[in-house]
Image (tube, helix red, strand yellow):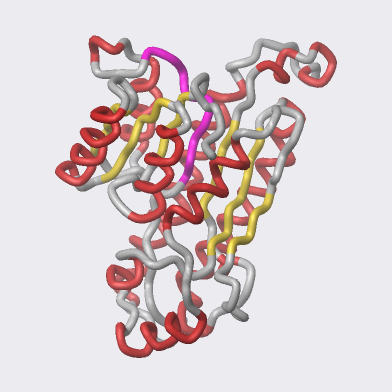
Amino acid sequence: MAHDLSRRVAIITGASSGIGAAVARVLCAAGCRCVINARRADRLESIAGELNGARPGTAATVVGDASDAKTIDALFEKARASAGAGGLGAPADLVVVNAGRGLSGSILTSDTAQWEDMIRTNLIGAARLMRKAAEELTRLVEAPEGEAGVNGAWLNRPRDIVVIGSSVGRNISPFSSMYGSTKFGLHSLAEAMRREIGPKGVRVTLVEPAIVESEFQSVAGYDPTTFGAFMRRIGPVLTPRDVAEQIEFVVSRPAHVHACDVMIRPTRQDYP
């Protein structure tokens, strides 16, 4: 059963497929309004049309690279813009840092030509969005520095930054160690930011999915035969909706309750 998120406004990156698209669908079904982002305009507009068809005024779009500073600024501006300008008319209080990409292989076997793009997307781009989100969300509740816990204003408005990590950002995976290294770094940034802005009433939640069946595997270059056999051995594996429903639960908690680190695995996945 969906929770009531009708007072929330979310930004979701990487929302044209997989986990991002599932998060948009689940949050909007719970009443949340969402600014969704991806580079593929046709896929993004199709999902926005689906969401707005179910509930008019639910979704707005920003097409672009989520690691680009101009795109990041546009996401927050789109949330604040009036409905007449294609926006949602309210500042975002929930940001899902989801955009990212995979890469098959270890430091010895992965394609070196893809290293820099992956690091830029998964780590630097995510950090830029996290920084902007922290700046915006800490301003939503007016309180003197260090007094958020004293005047209690933050209790009336939950504010969330949800960072999508990976089980391979906690457990070393020989078949994807270069990708895993970006998630290890991202996990560190998420926990550090939680300690920095949690006292101001902003929740920073790290969500670490294990194997999720989506187009992620093919884009990352995993061998369909060997990886398919692995997925069948541990299956059924997670679906994007499984992850999205966990995120919905986390952000629907009262403002004083924080599930700050969520690992999600298929029941039969032993490692990583």
Magenta span has 122?
no
Q: Is residue 148 left or right of residue 250?
A: right
Q: Position of residue 242 (x, y in %)?
A: 49, 56
Q: Residue at x 39, y 50 (%)?
A: 99
Give residue 165's position: percent from left, percent from top.
54, 57
Is residue 95 magenta-colored? yes
- Count of marks overlaid on the render: 0
Q: State left or right for residue 213 relative to residue 113.
A: right
In the image as oriented, which residue stretches furthest toward the right? 150
Task: In the rendered view, tell whether residue 156 sits above or below residue 122.
Answer: above
Q: Nearer the viewer, residue 227 or 130?
A: 227
What residue occupies the far left of the structure in this picture?
Answer: 42
Query: Where, by quadrant of the figure, is residue 256 drawn?
Result: top right
Q: Is residue 178 above or below residue 4?
A: below
Work out which quarter of the rendered image holds the N terminus and state it.
top right
Q: Which residues are magenta?
A: 89-97
The correct choice, above or below, for 129 with respect to 267 in the image is above
Residue drawn at (48%, 78%) of the image: 235
Picture coordinates of residue 200, whole percent (x, y): 72, 26
Image: 69 above or below 77: below
Q: Residue at x 45, y 30 (%)?
A: 10
Res 41 → quadrant: top left
The quarter of the picture where residue 120 lies is bottom left
